[in-house]
Each structure stands twice: as structure tokens, then as C-alpha cells.
Image: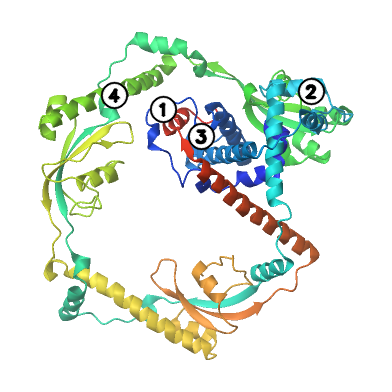
Amino acid sequence: MLELLRRGATSKVAAVILFLPLIVAFAFWGIGPEWSNGGSTWLAKVGDQRINPEDFQRAYQAEIEQISRQAGRRITAEQAKYYGLDQRVLSRLASTAALDQEVRGLGLTLSNQLIGDEIRADPSFAELNGKFSKDRFDAIMKQNNLSEQSFVAMRKRDEVREQLTDSLLAGMTPPQAYVDLIHKWRDETRTIEFITLDPAKVVKLAEPDDAKLKEYFEANKRQFLLPEQRKVGLLLLTREAVKSKVEVSDDEIKENYEQGKERFNIPEQRHVLQMAFPDKAAADKALPELAKAKNFVETAVKLGAKESDLDLGTLARKKMIDSKIADAAFALKKDEVSPVVEGTFATVVVKVTEIVPGKQKTLVEVTPEIKDGLQASKALREIQAMVGQVEDERSAGKPLSDIATKLSLPYIEIAQIDRTGKGPDGKPAIDMPDAPSLTAAAFGGTVGLDADPVDLADGGAGWVSVLGVSPEKERAFDDVKADAKTAWTEAETRRELATVSAGFVERAIKGEAMSALAKAAGAKLENTPAITRNTSPPGLTASGVQQAFTLPLNAASSVATADGKSRTVFKLTALKVPDEPSKEQSDKLKGELTRTLQSDTLNTFVAALQQRAGVSVNGAMLNQMLGGGQAGQ
């Protein structure tokens, strides 16, 4: 609701900033190494404009709420991070900060009187009669934890920011000739006939003799080199290994439970159906029919509601935005329909179709969970101490095997590993998620000079000692004869396929029917409908489509299949250049191109502002804020 109250949330600047590429703020500058201690009280700075953790947290939670509503389910913290929501939000805040700093530099401002007039005219704060309501305004401020002064200041920043960007983007529109050209380019259609060659049917290779294979081997010796191999020792300090040794007392578990009892309280949830109305009179009129309806949804749809708007899902009370509606829903019995509820933001009738009772988990139920968490926490502290012990032993010249024995840590010796992390049998030599980092360390050190410790994904550490090096070397033909035959066959098949497909292309260009070529190749003739450049028809790669749009009518060509193991021969059989766009098409396309032009311009402008001011991000604090629990909890 808060975002909807800000005029900036529906302005051009906000709409464009929302979709600014992430490189604007962070992919270019990155997270600075100076933030290793996380001692700052602010999350990021653009010049002297600060972004506080509270600002980020509020915007991040709003983003998660919005994405969850769109997805129809609650997204987790891991999912939010996977989709880059944290970077997206931080990028948007940094972009806004850069604009605010420029506004101050230019001395732009608006009077409180003007902002006050706009707030009083905002329909969000109006009663049913359309007039501003101070009581409604105060209620909304309270619900969003805002004071009147902070909201006015926020609106003023939004308005002045828009004043700046409006002047930058005003009158920015593409010429009609460009609109017409893009329309023709986008809506041009082409029809294609094609066949996909089967190598087994069109390529006949004679069995290669040893002389031919040896010739291929000599010409491609590097392909058959035995890669450099290293013998390494690994000392692993994993969290799981340390956790298994950590003791947690019953008193500690009980104390943790009592201190955080609320997190083990599963609140009551209800499956809520809701129909909203423009006013109480309309709701009163519909209530009798909804109250007696056997199927609330069907009846609500008959009364004019959209089915997609009716089901709020299964929610806890605190997840319902409007407290008045929440109170009404949680006062109902199962399958009971409420009276008309005049909520803070809407007038509704609700029905509860399912009640999931709440539950306070007992100490016995959550003891394994608490114990695991305490062990993990203690393990991380123990790991920090043990890393120091290992480093002290290394400084004293002790080998990793002796250190592992002394500290009772896992030690693994690998006889052979190459740069790809594989052993002589072609399988991974290190069977754990951190294998790439450990392999890199193995090839970053030398015999007698070990690499620095590797930070493991679970918070632990690993040390790699190089015990021996076997340089890459040539292998004898007899040792790789089978591999040479496979490689020769693949290379010759590709070469022969190119020759065969070129012959079919030439026959197609000369006018031979594609059906005849399909019969000759023992292939299936396929046709696309009239497609545009952005279409992906089954059986034809994107590269093939792009090639087809460069050819004249009745021309032919070939393209490799998606797996690279064959080729597709195709012919352009029809093309149609679209007529001039209608006014509706032209206006729609011009609007789209205008938005793109404005986005690119604002993107460049904000990037220049950030580059001039400098962007710093407290990476340690960001990681700490995103490190625990489920998104939105």
C-alpha cells in the first residue's frame, strides 16, 4: 500500500528505475573489499547519500511480497537470492539515491503547500464522497509506521525527483519513419520448408585403417595429451565434522527455547475467500445471495467478480494486510460468511472454507532443531579457533597429514588429479561441492609451498598440499587408438555432412522440390507456418530462423542442429512484408519505443551520476541481513 501512495511509484522515473539493469549500480563497481569488518551502520552510499539497512529491508520485503503475490505462493530467502531480488532492490535504491543527490546539487525544491495540496487530492486518502479524510490519512500512516512529517518529506523527494527526470525525458519520442521501419521488421513473416539429415542414412564412412588413424593422431596430438596430474593431500575442517564433536547441554536447549518461544508458535491459518465491492450499499445488496450460496466463488462470479480476485489463499492473521478484514475473517466459523466488512482499503464480504489450528511446539518437539542450530553456531566459533591452530602448525613446518592426526581432522590423499578435478578414470577425484575451489588450490601451489586455505561453502576451511607433479605428456598412438578412432569418426562425419548438405542446398536452389530431397535423404519434410523473426518453430534452431530472414525468396541454406550432430537443410518458400501499420498499431509501437528510449536515456544518466559520485556497498552487512530465515519472516 505504501508504494501505491507514493506518486513516484507510478511515475516515469520509478517505472524506468524499476527495470534498470543491475550493472548500473553493482556489476560495474562491485562490492568493495573495504567492507570486510561490517562495522558501518549504513548499507550503501552513493556519494554522500546513504542507504540505511532499514530502507533496504523495507523495500526488500515489499519486493518479496509483490513477487509472492504474482507467483501465488510464498517465496523463500534462497529463491529470492537466486533470482537476484536483493541486488535488484539495492540497485533501485542506489539509482534513486543518485538522483536525489543530483536534485540537491541543482537546488530543486517544492513548497510544502504544493505537496500538501497533492496529498489532499490523492484518492487514497478520500472517503466514499471523494473528499480528503484526515482520519483515513492518519490510519494509513499508522498502518505503514510513518509519521506525517516523514511521509510529506518522502512525497516531496518523489515529486522533485520526477521534476528532474521529466525535464530530461520530455518530448523524447521516436520519429514515425523509425516506427514504420520497426513495424515492418517485426511483423514480416516467412514460411520455411526443411529436412533434418540423419547421419546414419546420408554419411557412409569406410572403416579407417591404422595408417589413417595414425595420420589423424599425428595432426592432432594435443587433443590426446595426458594432462598434468598432481598428487595432493587434503586437510578438511568441515562444519559437519566439527558439529559432531560439539556438546550442547539440556539447559542450553531449554534456555534457547524459552528465549525464542515465539518462533516455535505456529499461528492459526484460514483459507479465506473474499469479494470486494465499490461501496457498502453494493455489498449489502449482494450479501443475502452470498450468505446462502452453496458455492461462494460461482455466486461471486455471477455477481460480477473476477474469479482470480476471490481466493486469498490460506493465511495467518498477520499476513492479511487489512486488520479489520483479518479480524472479521478470524471471528468466523468454518464455511461461515461474514457480514459486510468496511475495511481500511475496501468493503468486502468474506468466507472461511478451512481452519488450520495453531500450535505451540513443545520443547520435546523442537529439541532436535534447537540442538542442531546450537551445534552449528558453536561449530562455526570452534572452526575459527581451529583454523588458527592449523595455521600455527603449518607455520612450524608440520605436514598436513601430521596436523590432521594431531587435531583429529579428516585427511585425504589423492594420487592423481588434473585441472578439471578428474582422476585417471575420468571421474571426479574430490567428491564434495567445494571440489572446484580445492582443485584450483591444488594447481595454485607447488611442492613444498602450499596454497592459502580455502573457504568452504559450509563455513569451514580446507588446506591443500601438493605432494607431487606429473607434467602433461604425449601419449603413444597405441594407448589412444580407440579415442583417436572416435575423434576421427566424429570429425569425418561433420565434414561429410557439410558436403552432403551443401549438395542438397544446391539442388533446392536449382528448383528441385524439397519433398524430392526429403525422399532422397530418407528424411521427413517439415513446414513452418508463417513465422516472424522471434518465432522458435519446432525442429529449426534460432540460428536457422535468423538465416532464413536474410535469404531472398526460394533461396536455401543449411544450419547445424541444436545438438551439433547433424544439419538441417531449409528453403524459403514464402515471405510477406506487412502493410503500413494502423493508427492503433503505430501508437502502441511508438509508446513501446518511447519507453525503451526513455529507459536507455535514464539508465545512461543514472550510471553517469553514480560513476561521478562513486558507489560503496557494505557487503558484510548485506550478507548478514540476508543470511537467516525465510524471506519475509
The residue drawn where x is 80% and y is 20% is 135
Of the residues tagged 2 and 3, which is closer to the observer? 3
Hey, which quadrant is residue 94 in on the image?
Answer: top right
Determine which of the numbered discs, if any, sits on residue 24 in the image: none
Callout 1, which amino acid? Gly
**First of labels 2, 3 by sequence position:** 3
The residue drawn where x is 71% and y is 47% is 166
Give the alpha-carbon distance from disc 2 to disc 4, as whole Å: 54 Å
- Pick the front one: 193 or 412: 412
Callout 4, which amino acid? Lys
- Pick the front one: 403 or 445: 445
Quadrant where the N terminus is found in the figure: top right
The answer to whether the residues at label 4 and label 1 have Cβ atoms under 8 Å apart is no
Determine which of the numbered discs, if any, sits on residue 136 in the image: 2
Give the alpha-carbon distance from disc 2 to disc 3, as whole Å: 36 Å
**First of labels 1, 2 by sequence position:** 1
Give the alpha-carbon distance from disc 1 to disc 3, as whole Å: 14 Å
Q: Residues within 10 Å of mark 3 (few under 14, many from 20)?
A: many
The answer to whether the residues at label 2 and label 4 have Cβ atoms under 8 Å apart is no
Q: Relative to 189, does residue 447 appear above or below in the rendering?
A: above
Callout 3, which amino acid? Lys
The residue indicated by pointer 3 is 45
